Image: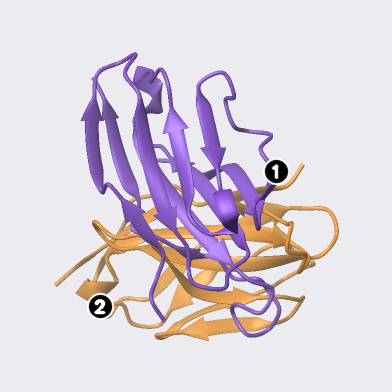
Chain colours: A purple, B orange
């Protein structure tokens, strides 16, 4: 099966500019996640969708970050305006109740979008 | 709250050495436990998992046993190769609910020298 697709792979912007990242999950996966991975740290969940509804956005900085998943398939994560501390890799992942075979709801990750804010 | 703690890296080993990367967790209920690996320039890949106490996950020569009594899920490999050089992340997920989120440790970098 095709994996999780993300674009762009790399983006360099100046602070206060805006940026958008796109994710296409594995076909049939109802759950989609956006994680932020700062250099030297483990990934941190920003937002989780179940179909096109938000399940958890408790750690999303809503004053500058937004995400949507129209039609329950593709998703877009936007940052406006960007700050220096937003420099990170933004990982998209998807899962289904049967992914991983034993009901563990295993996440499959994309390659990530690396953001550098100058 | 739920959290995962991994041993500090980097870990530097010679080829064919024995590997242990320690991982302990704090969680309510009965989480599922995972090890993910991130090779340079690539995304996270699932390495192995265990969904209940005393389960052993294994893949590509790596093993980890879910120890509820010590709240640990240490990663081991008997003989590492240069190609195993990567960052390893331990993670937990509460239950099998589709709404449970994956919580990661900070990652441990492994460098294997020929």
Mark number displayed over residue B51: none
In the shown orientation, is residue A118 left or right of residue B3?
left
Q: Is residue B14 visible?
A: yes
Horizontal and vertical percent position of residue A35 = 50, 46
Q: Is residue B37 left or right of residue A65?
A: left
Give the structural element (helix, strand or loop) at label 1. Answer: strand
Give coordinates of residue B43: x percent, y percent: 35, 60
**CA–CA distance between discs 1 and 2?**
39 Å
Percent of width and height locating residue B53 = 77, 76
Where is mark 2, residue-wise? B81
Residue, x 71% and y 75% (percent of image)?
Answer: B51
Label 1: which residue? A56
Question: Mark 1 or 2, which is nearer the eye?
Answer: 1
Total labels drawn: 2
Q: Secondary structure at mark 2?
A: loop
Query: Quick one: label 2, few (<14), some, or many (20+) residues within 10 Å?
Result: some
Residue situated in front as seen by the camera: A96 or B86: A96
């Amino acid at each position: 099966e095709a994996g999780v697709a993300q674009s762009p792979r790399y983006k360099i912007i100046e602070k206060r500019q805006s940026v958008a990242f796109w994710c296409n999950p594995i076909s049939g996966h109802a759950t989609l996640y956006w994680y932020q991975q700062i250099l030297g740290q483990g990934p941190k969940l920003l937002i989780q969708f179940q179909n096109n509804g938000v399940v958890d956005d408790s750690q999303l900085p809503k004053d500058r970050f937004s995400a949507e998943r129209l039609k329950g398939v593709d998703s877009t994560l936007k940052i406006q305006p960007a700050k220096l501390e937003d420099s990170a890799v933004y990982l998209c992942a998807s899962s289904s109740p049967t992914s991983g075979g034993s009901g563990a709801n295993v996440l499959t990750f994309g390659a990530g979008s690396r953001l550098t804010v100058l | 709250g739920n959290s995962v703690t991994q041993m500090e890296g980097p870990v530097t080993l010679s080829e064919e050495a024995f590997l242990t990367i320690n991982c302990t967790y704090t969680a309510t209920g009965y989480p599922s436990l995972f090890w993910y690996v991130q090779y340079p320039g690539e995304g996270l890949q699932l390495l192995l998992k265990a969904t209940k106490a005393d389960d052993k996950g294994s893949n590509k020569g790596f093993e980890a046993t879910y120890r509820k009594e010590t709240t640990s899920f240490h990663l081991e490999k008997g003989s590492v190769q240069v190609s195993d050089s990567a960052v390893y992340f331990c993670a937990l997920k509460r239950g099998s609910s589709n709404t449970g989120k994956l919580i990661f440790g900070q990652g441990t970098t492994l460098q294997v020298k020929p």
